[in-house]
Amino acid sequence: MILSKYPFVVQKEIIDNMNHLDLPLLSFVSKNMKKLIMSSQKKRSKSIRSIEYQYNRADGTCVVYLIDESKPIVKYHRRSSRTEDDVIMKIVKLDEDKNDTVQFNVLGNMIDLRFSDDYKYPIAFYLEWDKESIFQSIHNHFLDVFGDTIEYNWEDPFWKNPKEFFIPFIPKLKNVSFCIGLYLDGHFSDVRNFENFFSSSPVAKTINLHIKTRMEPLSPESKFYQAEYVYITTPGIDGPDFVRHFRGRQIGLYCDRYRKSELIDIVKRWKSGEAFQNLEYVQIRTHHSTEFLLPVLNDIGAKSINAFRQTPTHTVRTLLSWGNKNRHTYPLISHRYIVRVTDNRVASVDVMGATFLIGVWDKTEEEFLNMLE
């Protein structure tokens, strides 16, 4: 079917009823087709949650997913999970065989695309010297087609073999949230290399840090602390304090040992308004016993709620992996809370097993207590 031969009204009707995943492919055909799809998407994109870039730093391949909330949930599969059916493009290094590629002008950048019956999506190619430019053109094309009201996420997770070192590739893309996984070992165990990487990269929204060796403390002004979400694992290592100067929203910390004094310091600095003004949620999991952590609730001056009253459940949306299928933090229901002196803001606190939890409410103490049943 040659779509361009049909009247405009018919073209529009066909596009309005096409699958979201087919539209990106069609949008590369011509400028007029792209404009037609753009006008259609303004009405249809409400069901699209996000465009997800999953980059493999080992071979330089990036898989682009379109996550459509209107799709039925596959049994035994989470809606948020990515499948091969959600792929709209792959971006890979250019191989020697260019005979089956077609060049398209994508926002002024000539890009080699390969179309194959083996795949439902095109494959875009880049040379190392113009790698970032190619990614920028493709991303800006998707911005045009789908708009800036949906989420755009870039994920560069841990490489499966931490013994092989690959510096993450973080291109400068508009309206994109970056999730970076790093092993703090080898190259990055030198604090200068660690700081240089973050200072030269866009601010990461989410950082998963696996600490394998000791490192000197970071500068309090490090861009690392500008991330909104950090999840830090420190098995067997008493590394530097990576949360003391954190200015984001959520902290996940898994470690063998964590001093009571450091835990108390986090809470007291929040209560005084000195630090952690944007904090929403903290989960610190240790190998200590519950008996070790419980006294901390008294040490931080936590207030108690009558055990016979029902307290509200604190949970917030998250980009961290807390083990929950709905991308929310673990529900926190507690009869202990603390209050920030600067604005009377309340945070629920609790100890569950070997885990210390903090959940900050957008409520004053009076408003919080009015929520009790």
Image (tube, grey):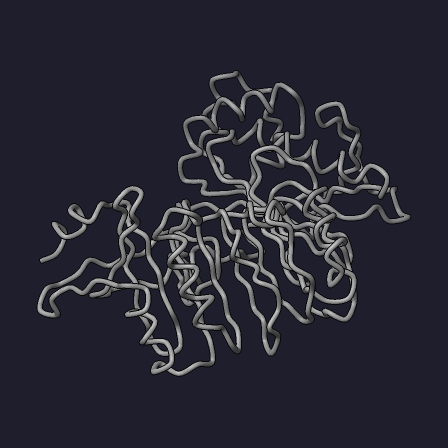
Looking at the image, residue 71 lies above or below residue 284: above
Q: Residue at x 65, y 40 (%)?
A: 202
Name the residue nearer the viewer: 30 or 240. 240
Q: Residue at x 76, y 34 (%)?
A: 133
Q: Quadrant of the N terminus?
A: top right
Left or right: where 307 falls relative to 290: left
Name the residue nearer the viewer: 184 or 98. 184
Left or right: where 7 falls relative to 89: left
Can you tell which quarter of the image residue 125 is in?
A: top right
Q: Quadrant of the C terminus?
A: bottom left
Can you tell which quarter of the image residue 269 is in?
A: bottom left
Looking at the image, residue 265 lies above or below residue 95: below
* Residue 80 picture location, percent across and down: 46, 55
* Residue 89 picture location, percent across and down: 65, 44
Q: Residue at x 21, y 62 (%)?
A: 303
Looking at the image, residue 23 lies above or below residue 77: above
For the image, the number of numbered tags is 0
* Residue 40 picture location, percent across and down: 47, 25
Left or right: where 223 falls relative to 346: right
Looking at the image, residue 124 lies above or below residue 348: above
Name the residue nearer the viewer: 59 or 253. 253
